[in-house]
Image (cartoon, coloured by chain):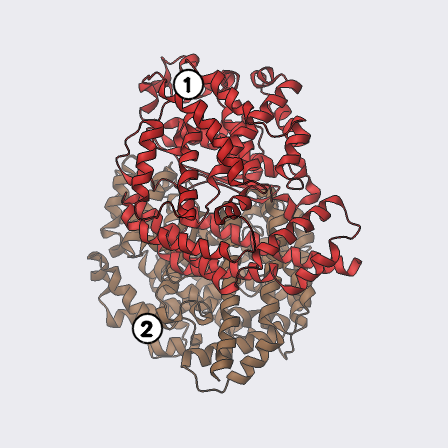
Chain colours: A red, B brown
Amino acid sequence: MKNLLNKYLDFERKIETYTLALKTMLYDSSTIAPKNGNDYRNEKMAELSGEIFSIKTDETRYKILNDLKDSDLSIALKKQIFYQLEDLDKLRSIPKDRYIAYNLLINKAEKIWEDAKEHSDYRMFEPTLALVVEMTKEIYTYRDSETSLYERMLDDYEPESTEMFYDKFFSEMKNTIIPIILDLPTKVFSFAYKDFSTEKQKDFCSFIVNFLNFNSDSLYIGESSHPFSSSFSIDDSRITNRYNAFDFSSSIFSLIHELGHATYNSQVDREYQGMYIADNMSYGMHESQSRLYENQLGRQPAFWHNNYPKLQNLFSDQLKDIKVNDFIEFINYATPSPIRVEADELTYCIHIIIRYELEKGLFNGTYTTKDLDKVWNEKYHDYLGLTINNDSDGILQDIHWSNGSFGYFPTYALGSAYAAQFYSAMEKDLQIEKLLLNNRFDVINNWLKEKIHHDGGIYRSKEILLRATEEEFNPQYYINYLTKKFKGN
Amino acid sequence: MKNLLNKYLDFERKIETYTLALKTMLYDSSTIAPKNGNDYRNEKMAELSGEIFSIKTDETRYKILNDLKDSDLSIALKKQIFYQLEDLDKLRSIPKDRYIAYNLLINKAEKIWEDAKEHSDYRMFEPTLALVVEMTKEIYTYRDSETSLYERMLDDYEPESTEMFYDKFFSEMKNTIIPIILDLPTKVFSFAYKDFSTEKQKDFCSFIVNFLNFNSDSLYIGESSHPFSSSFSIDDSRITNRYNAFDFSSSIFSLIHELGHATYNSQVDREYQGMYIADNMSYGMHESQSRLYENQLGRQPAFWHNNYPKLQNLFSDQLKDIKVNDFIEFINYATPSPIRVEADELTYCIHIIIRYELEKGLFNGTYTTKDLDKVWNEKYHDYLGLTINNDSDGILQDIHWSNGSFGYFPTYALGSAYAAQFYSAMEKDLQIEKLLLNNRFDVINNWLKEKIHHDGGIYRSKEILLRATEEEFNPQYYINYLTKKFKGN
């Protein structure tokens, strides 16, 4: 047994090493890498993915996992092996050469998407998207499963979620939220779109890192066209941000959001360092932590009590006549807008629902990539009353489809719903407002650590919710939160 | 044969993939990585090095290389296989666990050196340096060779170089150069040490990239405590720089230097992309290209004819009264100073000779790490007339010994000597001054490409010198260049 376990741990060490190498290359590639090196680098990243794939699907490892799965091991190891066998059954269904080809395709597609977005031309990207969809279908067809292709994708991002589950959740959301959106008053916050130096935005971001009690010696903030977060280890969080001089609040809330992700990974028990379960949380669960940071916490008045004066001080020209209450009103203002990542928390879920409906349609045959931009624009018109004028503000805005991440979007809304439920539980234990007023974000982080973070990905979302909130998933928290906040505003 | 060749190329592809991953991790680690992640990251980098080592030393690969070595292949492949077998005979001598342990040690040592340098305390580093020396001895003892331990190290950085060769070269240098140094007049250039905004220094560096005709879409310039260059591929050059507001010329000449390295790699024939011989030039040969850029080209008046007005324009406050000739005098001023990387080209070789004498002494038993700082300071006093006041300006200034790079330093002086010989040959073919005045650095780069760069690492230094200059190595070019420039100044 000892020997078997050591062999298993040797495999894991190798996988973790190559995975960290690949994460480093991906982060490099998305932030600083010179573009002329893309082709060669993409080829090498695809090869490295292929190597990881080979090691994961190695017959010896598969046998070892099966031999170990009923052994007397720690809960963490037992769970880890269970999840890894589950993953492996998915992976083993894919022929290696097809897996490498798929990775090569999506690496290239990402760069083509970037170019197309820059030119705001869906036609430049459509043939590539068609290939990605086709090949994604192929990859999921290999998997032995009774469920629809799209449901297999959903399951990869949020285990045990189904089309029926999302259909029900999203239909409730649409019924409640769309009428509220159509009834929203409009207001103009002209102060917010003046020229705010990006260098000073970065300075303010450093204050926020500090306020959120994140150890800056464990963090690097790069720049990329789309903010993201990547955990290199418990003590090494990489996030990215983007800075727009004429939309200063964007970098602030992106930062808070990404630090929500980073805090999750950084508060996992140290004994899981380098283990698979240190970083295999579901996408929905991970998103719940970033949304909780960004919305429930980051947008409430108490959060800004000590931080707004600092902001005002940095941007004295732009904000000298703007009271904290005006600022609070601005950051909680909801109105339909075309860009998902810039959307307020009310209209946000509709952006997700539109993508869900499109993805589902692409894989069950209702839609094709050919006219997908039209369908996109129609739904934006019907659900949000918006006219989309160019593709970069429409169908080309998100990176996800270019890298084959279908089934990912719905977890953003699900994460928002989890967040509302967690916040409600947190409120029972902590005087959140007082903690924010007194710069005690550490207490909030400790609650999250104890209730959610320290276990890493040992438990599935259902169990985490039950442990942390003593209740099953209940979307009503999210609906009530939004309704209370935005109805009849 | 076809089959054998394909198997060989599969090995090569894997090695190149892992090597690029490791380079990316090293670049990341030296530039942006948060320090709390060091331990885990170092462990993983050591594991990745270990994997590369395993693949390189795989018995099957060794057999394939031997089976292929006399086959009918292209010159490039034949040479590549010859060098790889040579490397392999060195590597195969080292037990894998010792190799991993060594990599782990030097990764840690680099961070300890960094800390010690920050605290300017050699005592903090000395025990670690002692370990590194001990383990370096062990690693080289495994190698089956008739030569001294230190000579084995010298051979790794400059194949076929010997202690006798360097002893002779350096004794000639000392005899000629030390008297010139002791006779140097002193002059103060107070304008050069005012406050020069580091942001504007970066802007000026962009001009220089352009002037040197380097494609900026194939380049990224990061920041690190010690400037270096790493070639990710022919189209992806990574260099670093450091910016000191009170020593503006440092970032300029570091940039020119590192771009000399980057240009070498970027002008290798495209058919060698991803091959070992695209990036296995000797250290001395690589350094010759950076020195040629930095000194013979970068410091001559014609280089500054069009560039100085731009510099003056950027720093109008600091340079408004400084004529181009004053600036030229400043950048060609020679005087003893404690820091190697900031040294002028005259005293530079003495910095190297001191390190050579210390390294040689460490490995033949004359010196130990215990008092090495004293020996360092004595030699700086004797050869350069300097009193070293603190370790960070003394024995702790360079990263090399912390990562076990003994035998590396001498190649810096050798590269400078190669550079002088190349420049003399270039002068016969090109009107260099005119080209610089007319912004035609492309013609200079083309000469370098045709004579030196395009072959990558196919040929050894001796052969490259013979092909490019039609003469064997002759240190007299270097000695004459320095004597003519600095004697009786």
Look at label 1 and name its amino acid.
Gln
Q: Which label sits on residue B451?
A: 2
Q: Is residue A69 left or right of residue B83?
A: right
Q: In this view, does B81 lie above or below B127?
A: below
Residue at position x 62%, y 25% from top? A444
Question: Is A233 in front, or is A179?
Answer: A179
Let me know if residue A113 appears in the view.
yes
* Distance between mark 2 and mark 1 Cα atoms: 60 Å
Let me know if residue B160 appears in the view.
no
Percent of width and height locating residue A371: 30, 45
SS type, badge 1: helix
Pinpoint the chain carrying mark 2: B
Q: Is residue A32 left or right of residue A423?
A: left
- On the image, which quarter does residue A458 sit in? top right
SS type, badge 2: helix
Question: Is B132 in front, or is B166?
Answer: B132
Circle 2 Cα neighbour tier, 10 Å, few/some/many (<14 / 14–19 / ≥20): some
Q: Is residue B261 above or below residue A182?
A: below
Circle 1 Cα neighbour tier, 10 Å, few/some/many (<14 / 14–19 / ≥20): some
Percent of width and height locating residue A259: 53, 33
Q: Is residue A280 above or below residue B423?
A: above
Question: Is A465 in front, or is A444?
Answer: A465
Residue at position x 43%, y 21% from top? A311
Look at label 2 and name its amino acid.
Lys
Q: Is residue B102 left or right of residue A188?
A: right
Percent of width and height locating residue A104: 43, 58
Residue holding disc 1: A312
Pinpoint the chain carrying mark 1: A
